[in-house]
Amino acid sequence: EVKLVESGGGLVQAGGSLTLSCAVSGLSFNDYAIAWFRQGPGKEREGVSCINALSGLTYYRDSVKGRFTISSDNAKNTVHLRMNDLEPEDTAVYYCAAAIFMGSSCAPVGFWGQGTQVTVSS
């Protein structure tokens, strides 16, 4: 059974930091990238970042470049998303997902976590 379990969301003031974690089981980092997506209130889901844990290849959407860092702990099958200098516009439910690289970004392949809420107050 494939499982992706997010943790680390919460409420933070603008300018603060959070680290999200995605614990993955039932699938191999050899076969899939792991991506973070988010869906803000009244907005469509958007890709935030993704990583190929074997090659180290990463993707970031423009609005988070320089503020967010994705990393993997291959021994623990866990992917982290460090989010610095958070802005109210980053408020969303954040989901991790198994993905594949398509060009320079990632597309989900149907395995999702349950999501974790990130709220940034101004």
Image (cartoon, grey):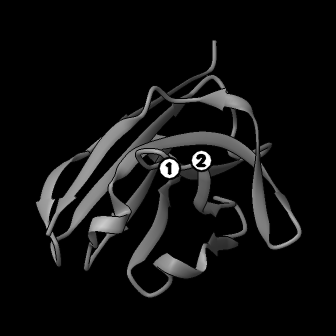
Q: Which residue is mark 1?
A: 38
Query: Can you give x and y, in whole percent of width and height, for residue 114 in the image?
Result: 45, 26
- Secondary structure found at label 2: loop
> Identity of the amino acid at label 1?
Arg
Query: Can you give x and y, in whole percent of width and height, for residue 81 in the image?
Result: 41, 60
Q: Residue at x 48, y 66 (%)?
A: 70
Asked if marks 2 and 1 touch (Cβ < 8 Å), the reply is yes
Q: Is residue 111 above or below residue 31?
A: above
In the rendered structure, the answer to whether residue 48 lies left or right of residue 54 reads left
Tell me the crowding category of disc 1: few under 14, some 14 to 19, or many 20 or more residues within 10 angstroms, Cα based.
Answer: many
Q: Quadrant of the N terminus?
A: top right
Query: Can you give x and y, in whole percent of width and height, for residue 35 in the image?
Result: 61, 52
> Identity of the amino acid at label 2?
Arg
Q: Residue at x 64, y 58 (%)?
A: 53
Q: How many numbered discs sit on the rendered protein?
A: 2
Q: Residue at x 61, y 55 (%)?
A: 46
Q: Which residue is mark 2?
A: 45
- Secondary structure found at label 1: strand
Q: Residue at x 25, y 79 (%)?
A: 85
Considering depth in this image, is 120 or 22 the residue closer to the camera? 120
- Number of the label disc, if any, that sits on residue 12: none
Name which of mark 2 and mark 1 comes first in the sequence. 1
Tell me the crowding category of disc 2: few under 14, some 14 to 19, or many 20 or more residues within 10 angstroms, Cα based.
Answer: some
Considering depth in this image, is 5 or 62 the residue closer to the camera? 62
In the rendered structure, the answer to whether residue 10 lies left or right of residue 55 reads left
Q: Is residue 109 above or below residue 94?
A: above
